[in-house]
Amino acid sequence: AGGGAGITMAKSGIARGLNAGHVVTPKARPFSQARRKGYLSKRVKVVREIVREVAGLAPYERRLVELLKLGKDKRALKLAKKKLGTHLRGKAKREEMAGVIRAQRATQKGE
């Protein structure tokens, strides 16, 4: 019979009353494999960079870049949302394409 939703107090070592129970030191457990899901590994990052370099941008991504160059950020977000399904994914894609533009400008400046 315990109260509280997941709140653990220090045990008192007494068999009765609040915080009843044997005093133990909690064991630090490593994270489960499921907690790692979605984490970007170095290998996957390199592979994606190479694929992006070889294949280039998708047609809708090229359109996003053009809209961003014209300063139509809101329209770019609307297009990205329509193509990707959610607001968060749309925002992330818009930021990614802004990064592509920044990279292009940096390479042009360097030449």
Image (cartoon, grey):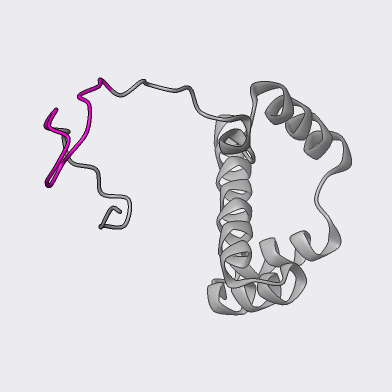
Figure check: 14 above or below 78 = above
Q: Work out whether 62 lies above or below 100.
A: below
Judged left or right of residue 100, residue 46 is right
Q: What stretch is highlighted in magenta?
A: 12-25
Q: How many marks?
A: 0
Residue 92 location, quadrant: bottom right
The residue under the point 18% across, 41% down is: 9
Instruction: Give the residue displayed 25% in from the left and 20% down from the top.
Output: 25
Q: Position of residue 15 (x, y in %)?
A: 17, 35
- Of 63 and 111, nearer the camera is 63
- Which of these two is toward me, 23 or 34? 23
- Residue 70's x, y, as percent? 60, 71
Residue 74: which quarter of the image? bottom right
Residue 60 lies, in percent from the top left, at: 80, 65
Q: Residue furthest front?
A: 16
Give the left or right position of residue 18, taking residue 4 as reference: left
Q: Does the magenta stretch include residue 24?
A: yes
46 above or below 104? above
Quadrant in which the C terminus appears:
top right
In the figure, 14 relative to 90: above or below? above
The quarter of the rendered structure image containing the N terminus is: bottom left
Residue at 75 percent of width and 60 percent of height: 61
For residue 82: magenta? Answer: no
Residue beneath the point at 60% across and 51% down: 96
Residue lying furthest right in this view?
Answer: 55
Q: Which x, y percent locates residue 42?
A: 65, 22
Name the residue nearer the viewer: 6 or 87: 6
Is the stretch drawn in magenta largely helix, strand or loop?
loop
